[in-house]
Image: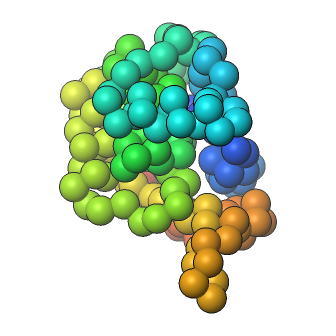
């Protein structure tokens, strides 16, 4: 039992849509982690992908939010080049999650391989968190051989399908 805080970064709004749905369903508090670098447009996305590939950090706000009143955390992030976004990796590296149950929630264009998910889990574990779940939702799907953006509603519906497992992991049932 305990209060739940959702911390997320979203560039396109996909991760935000899923996290806001989780917030409503869990009556959780929510906090957006903002990347202070502009990642929009083709050049911004290219820099983000390269930065992600090389594990760089970025300036974020808030840098060290007060998580002391929360037993459960959901960390939401898009996946870039097989890794959590730069803003979320920076957030994890600069904070401690001792004594907290953590669920990692991602939006992605292709399902991640287990070895990449394990790297993300290990980042949280190294920061003291107990990873009790990892959920991913596709932001694109292949239709007739073409990658097509999924609607925010589809992302929310997929996110809600995890709710029984999330509640069980946080002992909220």
Where is 124 relative to 157, above or below? above
Q: Position of residue 139 (x, y in %)?
A: 61, 61
Which residue is painted at 69% across and 33% down in the image?
Answer: 40
Where is 135 relative to 84, above or below? below
Residue 123 visible: yes
Residue projecting furthest to the bottom: 144
Q: Give residue 29's quadrant in the image.
A: top right
Q: What colouring style does the render use?
A: rainbow
Q: Position of residue 86 (x, y in %)?
A: 46, 29
Where is 41 relative to 137, above or below? above
Residue 159 visible: no
Q: Position of residue 111 (x, y in %)?
A: 42, 65
Which residue is painted at 62% across and 88% down in the image?
Answer: 144
Which residue is painted at 26% across and 61% down in the image?
Answer: 114
Where is 112 relative to 43, above or below? below
Count of numbered labels shown in the rendering: 0
Of residues 104 and 43, the one drawn nearer to the viewer in this rendering: 43
Which residue is painted at 61% across and 17% down in the image?
Answer: 37
Q: Give residue 101's quadrant in the image.
A: top left
Q: Position of residue 2 (x, y in %)?
A: 51, 37
């Amino acid at each position: 039992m305990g209060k739940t805080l959702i911390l997320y970064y979203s560039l396109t709004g996909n991760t935000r849509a899923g996290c806001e749905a989780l917030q409503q369903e869990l009556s959780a508090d929510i906090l957006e982690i903002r990347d202070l670098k502009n990642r929009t447009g083709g050049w911004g996305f290219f820099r983000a992908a390269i930065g992600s590939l090389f594990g760089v950090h970025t300036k974020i706000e808030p840098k060290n939010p007060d998580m002391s009143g929360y037993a459960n955390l959901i960390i939401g992030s898009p996946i870039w080049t097989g890794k959590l976004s730069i803003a979320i990796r920076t957030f994890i590296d600069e904070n401690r999650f001792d004594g907290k149950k953590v669920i990692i929630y991602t939006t992605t264009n292709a399902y991640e391989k287990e070895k990449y998910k394990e790297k993300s889990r290990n980042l949280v574990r190294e920061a003291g968190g107990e990873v009790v779940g990892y959920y991913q939702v596709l932001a694109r799907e292949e239709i007739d051989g073409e990658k097509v953006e999924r609607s925010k509603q589809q992302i929310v519906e997929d996110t809600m399908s995890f709710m029984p497992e999330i509640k069980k992991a946080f002992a909220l049932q």
